[in-house]
Image (cartoon, grey):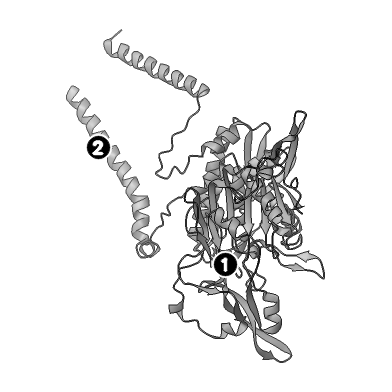
Amino acid sequence: MSATKRKDILGFLISLAILILVNAISSISFFRIDLTSENRYSISEPTKKLLENLSEDVLIKVYLQGEDLPSSMLRLRNETREILNEFRAYSGGKMDYEFINPSKHPDKKERDRIYKNLYEKGLRPTDLQIKNDDGMAQKIVWPGAIIVYQGKEMAVQLLKSQFGAPPQVILNQSIESLEYSLASTIKTISSDELKSIAFIEGHGELSKFESADIIGSLRDYFHVERVKINGNINSLAHRVAVGKDSTNMLVKNKFDAIVIAGPDSAFSEKDKFIIDQFAMYGGKTVWLVDQVQASMDSLRKGGFTMGLSKSLNLDDLFFQYGVRINYDLVQDLRAAPIPVVTGQFGNQANSQLFPWLFYPLMVSQNNHPINKNIDVVRAQFANSIDLVGNNSLKKTVVLSTSDKTKLVKAPTRISLNMVSFNPPEEQFTKKNVPIAVLVEGEFTSVFDNRLPPNITNAGEIKYKNKSPETQMLFISDADLIRNRYNPRTNEYYALGFDQYTKQLYGNKDFFINAMHYLLDDSGIIVSNTKSFKIRLLNSDLVEHNRLLIQVLNTAVPIALIILIGLILHFIRKKKYTLKK
């Protein structure tokens, strides 16, 4: 056997051994390498853990399939497939997916039945204008998915909305949110035990009708109920006697979080104590508090109203927890419109939409998981918030106004005639005024050093003066989660929907994100901080150099292959000719 032949056989055996070794290692140790600068194809550790610990099979039905999809939908479909491939790989075969074309049925009635079924399950279609040989055609696309687990189904909207944002930005934000949207829904549908939220009543808070939409939406993810405190120390906590000593209690909160939305009467010291101790025992608290009373209903009826300060008896508590909600009203040049009657047309009132400065539109100022990739949020008669007090607490502004803001101190007269005048821009000197603030850390009780020893030392009360690591969210506008309600028909409308502009603001997404952030111990919401760079083609350059680009992308690669082939042929011919 010649040396050359032995060398070839040895090389083959080494290659075969390497191949067998790689397969053996990969069978017992799974890993992937993501070479993108943004870790585009990497999923977070909490998501991996969720997928690895699935106890039953999960099926994801994606409805982004069909003929003649525009390039944006094709990109979203491909990115969705990429991340689902990652999910399937880390789930150990417990998760699978399929892409379905809901429009493929030739019969229109059957298509309409399918569309209705998807809509009832929670998916929302997108109407697109598609270019064809005959001009423009309308196409219905369902950019969403249904997740199936143990006979239960939950919908996921894959295409986000962003008021006023360019389509490419909306698409990019949707892709950034894919992992979080899918993983959080899988976690919810596969969880055996849901976290609990209590909406507090008894101080004039939002009624069950005014908060019906947000509570209904939260119930997809959490257990939610309404609770009256009424001075009952056991309203928010379980107290169990330790041993035979009835004066020594083990205290545990009944709920993981409480929401105090829109109180209009003063809190008693006893109710404040109960709420304070809920926080001291690690409970999460969300405050939606208006310090100034201003009614849009009375404004429409009489043409004006008064913005009057409320007396809620909460200022000392807020200051202790690191914020101050001021007795003022925010005006912003970036504002939502309202209809105002401007005259008569026959027997009909003629109305027009005017920006209402007391309805600021707020967008994300940072990439915090609570506010990232949500649509613009609308506030109504909001107050400014100052960050004060304990500097050891971490304070993050998660909603703020624009850089053209004005603060109006209460009491103040508010008139609809304001829409008739162009506001002097030089008066709007405030920038990025906080409307929602997240406070995190170890809180000190507002009753520290204020209570007599017979309370602080009482075993049946078990007073705590310092909390473990916990969080509070302060929002200076209860209308942020208030839905429109018709008392005559007992009907309520979608939270954030503007009947005049047909715009759906991001209020609901913001609040649900906030509750996920406060209550999700798994850390999946961290995946909502992904950021991908938009790498767009220069459309003008493409249009003016279309022929050149087409040649470069078709003829040049073929010419290079032919050239390389000729060079190799010449080299081989020269080599073997010399040998002869």
Q: Which residue is mark 1?
A: 383
Residue sitting at x 30%, y 14%: 7
Q: Which residue is mark 2?
A: 567
Give x and y (percent) for residue 150: 73, 37
Q: Quadrant of the N terminus?
A: top left
Q: Looking at the rendered structure, which numbered label has been put on residue 163?
A: none
Secondary structure found at label 2? helix
CA–CA distance in space, label 1 to label 2: 76 Å
Residue sitting at x 25%, y 37%: 567
Marks 1 & 2, CB-CB < 8 Å contact: no
Instruction: Tell me the amino acid under the disc marked 2.
Output: Ile
Counting residues from the N terminus, which is met first, the one under dot 1 or under dot 2? 1
Q: Quadrant of the C terminus?
A: top left
Give x and y (percent) for residue 293: 65, 71
Instruction: Tell me the amino acid under the disc marked 1.
Output: Asn
Mark 1 vs mark 2: give the one in front: 1
